[in-house]
């Protein structure tokens, strides 16, 4: 079962984290920064984006150990905010682009999941070719909502921190942003101390909303 989870979820995860990073780079380009474009990172080819640990080893470990959450990351797309036409606006938009992309993908996978479940109703019971496809689309909903919600956690350097920073007074904001040099240790501590236990109820609610919206468009 865990091997099946890995085989069906890993392609979806890699696709989703690549889209997340390309969205950052594409919006950065629209805001005036060509760094990602010049370095060849505005591509859906997964090879330039894959982080061997975050894109392969961590999700494989989670799947094979039955962790219950499939999670991972890609190599961050390089962005130089000094090139933005408007620094604050560009920083916020680029940061939100990745989570917005994951939300759109969650809806897309939900529509595909509902469509496959609807199409299989007229098939003989023994014709179950659709089952792995439906499972993959179902994983796509969950994976993208996990990526979206996790990246909104306001811990530098996660995406949510770039928005939260502008809600703080300048002196406090500067100290908050300086936390970025220790950010990955803080993120790791957050996860080890059960951070996903806090996030999963939120992800569950969003999942029900997304699937319900997709179900509205399913034929009766």
Image (spheres, rainbow, N blue to C red):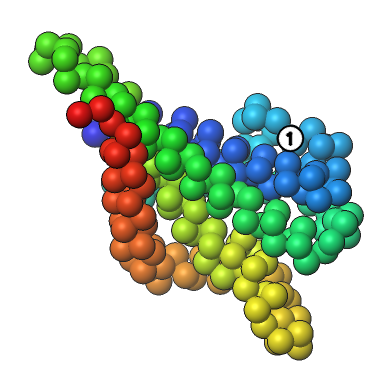
Residue placed farthest to the left in the image?
Answer: 125
Q: Nearer the viewer, residue 220 or 177?
A: 220
Is residue 35 in view from this perspective?
no
Up-down: is 186 above or below 56?
A: below
Residue at point 76%, 85% (across, down): 170
Q: Position of residue 109 (x, y in %)?
A: 40, 35
Q: Position of residue 53 (x, y in %)?
A: 56, 44
> The N terminus appears in which quarter of the rendering?
top left
Q: Position of residue 173 (x, y in %)?
A: 71, 81
| Category of crowding for the residue at label 1, using alpha-carbon neighbours closer than 10 angstroms: few (below 14), some (14–19), many (at least 20) | many
Look at the numbered disc 1 and give the secondary structure of its residue.
loop
Query: Would you name the residue on which mark 1 appears?
Result: 42
Residue 195, quarter of picture: bottom left
Residue 184, quarter of picture: bottom right
Residue at point 25%, 27% (across, down): 219
Q: Nearer the viewer, residue 60 or 96?
A: 96
- Describe residue 134's horizontal placement relative to residue 47 as left or right: left
Up-down: is 7 above or below 154?
A: above
Is residue 208 in view from this perspective?
yes
- Describe residue 152's horizontal placement relative to residue 193 as left or right: right
Residue at point 73%, 46% (across, down): 27
């Amino acid at each position: 079962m865990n091997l099946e989870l890995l085989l069906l979820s890993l392609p979806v995860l890699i696709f989703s984290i690549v889209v997340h990073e390309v969205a950052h780079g594409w919006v950065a380009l629209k805001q005036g920064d060509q760094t990602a474009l010049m370095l060849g990172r505005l591509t859906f080819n997964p090879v330039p984006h894959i982080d061997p640990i975050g894109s392969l080893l961590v999700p494989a470990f989670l799947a094979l150990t039955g962790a219950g959450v499939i999670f991972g990351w890609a190599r961050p797309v390089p962005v130089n905010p000094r090139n933005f036409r408007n620094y604050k606006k560009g920083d916020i938009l680029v940061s939100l682009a990745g989570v917005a992309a994951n939300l759109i993908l969650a809806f897309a996978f939900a529509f595909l999941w509902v469509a496959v479940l609807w199409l299989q109703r007229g098939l003989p019971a023994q014709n179950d070719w659709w089952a792995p496809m439906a499972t993959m689309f179902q994983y796509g909903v969950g994976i993208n909502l996990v990526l979206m919600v996790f990246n909104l956690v306001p811990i530098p350097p996660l995406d949510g921190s770039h928005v939260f920073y502008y809600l703080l007074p300048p002196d406090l904001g500067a100290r908050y942003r300086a936390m970025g040099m220790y950010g990955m240790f803080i993120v790791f501590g957050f996860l080890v101390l059960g951070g996903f236990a806090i996030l999963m109820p939120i992800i569950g609610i969003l999942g029900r909303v997304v699937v319900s919206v997709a179900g509205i468009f399913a034929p009766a």
